[in-house]
Image (cartoon, rainbow, N blue to C red):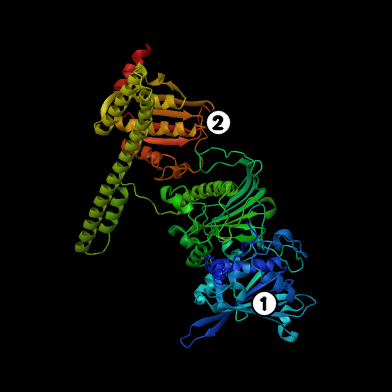
Amino acid sequence: MNDNSNKSFFKIDARTIFQLGKEAIENEMIAISEIVKNAYDADSLVCNINFEEVDLNNGDTWIKSITISDKGIGMSMADVESNWLRIGTDNKLYENETKIYKRRKIGEKGIGRLALNRLGSQVEIITRKKGHKPVRLHINFHTFKNGLDLVNVPVTIENIENNDDYQEIFPHGTIIKIFDLEDDWDTKKIEELENRTISLQNFLEDIHIDENNELSMISRSNNIQSDSFKINYYTNNRSMNSKLSQPIDYLQQSMFRMVAIIDSVNNTWDYVYSFNPYGKMSKLDRTITKSKNNLILDPNAKSGTIIQKDNIKLGRIKVYLFGYNFDNEIKEYVANTDFRQIKKTIKDVGGVKVYRDNQRVYNYGEPRTDWLELDSKRVNRPGRYLSNNVIVGAVDITRKNTDGLVEKTNREGFVDNKHYQRFKDIVASIVYDFSHKVQNDKARIKRLYGKAKQNLKSDSIFEDIIDTIDSSNISEVIKTEIKDGLYLYKEQLDYIKGVLFNVSVNAMDYLTIFHDLEDQLIVIKDRISKLTTDPESLRNLEETIDFVKNHNNIIRDKDIKNYNVNVLIDGILYEERYKLSKNNIILKTDFSKTKNLMIKLHRSSVKRIINNIISNSIYWTALNEKKIILVKTDAVEDKLTITIDDNGPGFDGDIEYLKEPFVTKKTVDEPGIGLGLFIIKELMNNSNGNVVFNNESEIEKNGARVILEFPIKGQTQWLIVLIKSYL
């Protein structure tokens, strides 16, 4: 640069105020939270939010202004001019601890004051620092127009001589009044805001949760701590206490609760989980489960995969989760509470929120902010995940241990870096585990209190209804009309069930075909890419042809025939050889007790059943160093039993619930849609057989066992053959 060059400077357009304020802040909740943060940083013990109502002629009310006040340290004239009116100050970064209560300051960006123009266009601030005169500041955001330099837009500031008018902030504090509001407010919106503003601060601060997950209120009247901070809500100075608006009111209505303490350094967590059925549900007792030193599972990897350790440390994380059951069958058991009001409240306050040093980090837990992907995963795994509108949760972290979690300037969460990804994975893992526990308990409720399900294969319930109609006193014409309608309805149900079942089975068939075919073709592609004609390539090609041919035969097979049991099962397992070999599975068999047994079976059904069981065993033993599957047969009395054991982790949770369609513990990105056990159950029913699932594997304690039982009624010829074979 030569000596004749001119110097120039950046200029800031007055409209930048809006770009950093109301255009950057999504909603009024975030705006109010920024103002509340400033009250917290000012060492106030309280922040009061007052809505000034004006009665209209039609009976409605109109909100004229919002006033937010605190009893913090306040500001002097010099503080206002040098700090408050200077945008982006870094004083909170270097003086990150408050002077009186030694709180960790949370409004560190230095632009929180710009949240005011998200709420309204006119702002008046009265503030007083101890030992100083009150200061009045008036801002008219209408004057911040395009083309004007920011430094040329004046604001009005003055000392107040008459202190008697502002006793509310004596001897120190701040009052902020916002009018000419940006949004229209009505009673409904105020109630919604009340419910949501309660969550600005950790809603568990005034609630004690004991070691058994029992809830009670904490009395703070004579025990003010440095972290005590209360937000009060008023309308025309009347306290706002909407029904179920206080956390203790709706949290006590939760049916499922879990408190988890996470050690992010060692990747372990402890928890207390409790199931709290409503008082009128006499068939169920309250249950409490406590567990320590559980390894954190990776929510993005194969089910059962432990999250990998790394050098990202987030300190101690505490997670509180409250789950609700809004299924129709339990409405009548909710005592002394409006079921609809609970549901509405949880819809407003639901979601898993994040608190750092007891203050809310937006936008986690807000409506339409599915940061843990609960709702999106639930679409693909409806039996695996809970939705946001049935969970109320809080994640508690400290700023001291989470410097790597950086809040965005627009207040909409953390910057998406490796620290945030690890934080999200840890929380998601805990919430998914909670979802699984809740679904198991909900299955118990359905069994005991749900409406009886009619087995469409049996006509007993249907015939009972017909008998009731026949024995009634109604006219024969009406009886005939009702019965004709019922017969038509049952015929339609049978048809729908058949269609759905066939679709499910065919879907599983094609999923299996294309999944396994893809593996085979990849092997062929790799070998051919080497431009060799070694015999191995030809063998792989022949296996692929046989594989596709066998599956096509299964799909076409509709007949029930006589089969030698040992030959049939051995052949089915032989067709699984590629899958077993690829996954390094040790297959053990014992068919000694069914030698020469002949039985009528539908081969494709048996193939589908065993294929599903083997696939599940391969999946759940994948993390074992040594993977074993044992298949045994036996003939007891009038039934054939096929027992399949593995050394995986076993069935986790309510086994009856796991048989329901679309229920799975696999994550959303893994193959399968939660129909495996359901199809096995239905195929066994259609074969007049039975299936038993338990965790009594003889290979490994608590490993999975599946027992298939087929009837052998009227097939006694095999007994003679069997006896002769042992003579």
Residue hosting label 2: 701
Above or below, comparing residue 107 to residue 466 in the picture: below
Q: Position of residue 723 (x, y in %)?
A: 35, 16
The number of callouts visible is 2
Disc number lying in front (2 or 1): 1
Crowdedness of circle 1 by 10 Å Cα count: few (<14), some, many (20+)? many
Q: Residue at x 66, y 51 (%)?
A: 402
Q: Position of residue 273 (x, y in %)?
A: 59, 49
Toward the top, the furthest residue is 727
Q: Quadrant of residue 228?
A: bottom right
Q: Position of residue 496 (x, y in %)?
A: 28, 49
Residue hosting label 1: 175
Q: Amino acid at mark 2?
A: Lys
Q: Is residue 694 visible?
A: yes
Secondary structure under tag 2 reads loop
Toward the left, the furthest residue is 477
Q: Position of residue 401 (x, y in %)?
A: 68, 50
Q: Are marks 2 and 1 in contact (CB under 8 Å)?
A: no
Q: Nearer the viewer, residue 367 or 610?
A: 367
Q: Nearer the viewer, residue 319 or 362?
A: 362
Above or below, comparing residue 15 to residue 550 in the picture: below
Q: Nearer the viewer, residue 257 or 295?
A: 295
Above or below, comparing residue 363 to residue 634 in the picture: below
Q: Residue at x 75, y 86 (%)?
A: 161
Q: Residue at x 35, y 29 (%)?
A: 521
Above or below, comparing residue 593 to residue 57 in the picture: above
- 208 sits left or right of 425 in the view: right
Task: Measure the alpha-carbon separation of dots 2 and 1.
Answer: 66 Å
Q: Amino acid at mark 1?
A: Ile
Toward the bottom, the furthest residue is 57
Which quadrant of the rendered structure holds the N terminus? bottom right
